Image (spheres, rainbow, N blue to C red):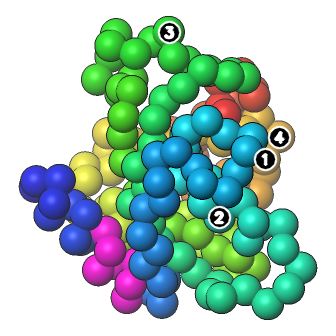
Amino acid sequence: MTHNELRKVFLDYFGGKDHRHVASASLVPQDDPTLLFTTAGMVQFKSLYSTTGELPYRRAMTIQKCMRAGGKDSDLENVGHSPRHLTFFEMLGHFSFGDYFKDESLAFAWEFFSKVLGVDTERLWASVYEEDDEAVEAWKKVGFPAERIVRLGAADNF
């Protein structure tokens, strides 16, 4: 599957789950003086997470251009040492603004990976924050084997 095909499949799947496609924000945030670069897919939604007014939508999906940069808990020094540490990447994300929570989010992601993409689920492991019993139960609900769910502390499960 090419990257363009993956993008289309992702947008088609989450579009079918009533998510609004929000275009990628600029790599240099225009309205956030706290950031030099967009470093995560949720950056463009910061104002929606903190608003108390009416939201323009309750579900969103995006393919956000991101740049790995320094800062707190940065792994910038790992760039180039593995295929997952790049300076520029796109983050495919689906977001809920009070419409659904952990159970539904995980179920959507699991269906997308296992059914839509056909990823070999026998090769997957799930990590959860060490105290997050809710996440463990959500993984079990979708049929993920308990023996492949690992609890990690904040240093390893950011």
Which residue type does callout 1 highlight? Asp
Q: Earlier in the sequence, mark 3 or mark 4?
A: 3
The stretch of residues the image draws in magenta is 10-16
- Per the image, the residue denoted by label 2 is 45
| Image-quadrant location for residue 124 | top left
Crowding at dot 1, Cα within 10 Å, few <14 / some 14-19 / many 20+, comes out as few
Q: CA distance from mark 3 to mark 1?
A: 29 Å
Which residue type does callout 2 highlight? Phe
Which residue type does callout 4 highlight? Glu
Dot 2 falls on a residue whose secondary structure is: helix
User: At 48% from the left edge and 90% from the top edge, which residue is drawn?
Assistant: 18
User: At 32% from the left edge and 74% from the top edge, which residue is drawn?
Assistant: 11
Q: CA distance from mark 4 to mark 2?
A: 27 Å
Is the residue under label 4 in contact with that under label 1 (CB below 8 Å)? Answer: yes
Please name whichever residue, 117 or 53, is drawn nearer the observer in this view of the structure. 53
Q: Earlier in the sequence, mark 2 or mark 1?
A: 2
Can you give x and y, in whole percent of width and height, for residue 80 in the image? 32, 13
Is the residue under label 1 in contact with that under label 3 (CB below 8 Å)? Answer: no
Task: State which quarter of the image contains the C terminus.
Answer: top right
Can you give x and y, in whole percent of width and height, for residue 26 in the image? 47, 54
Examine the rendering and report whether any part of residue 15 can be seen. yes
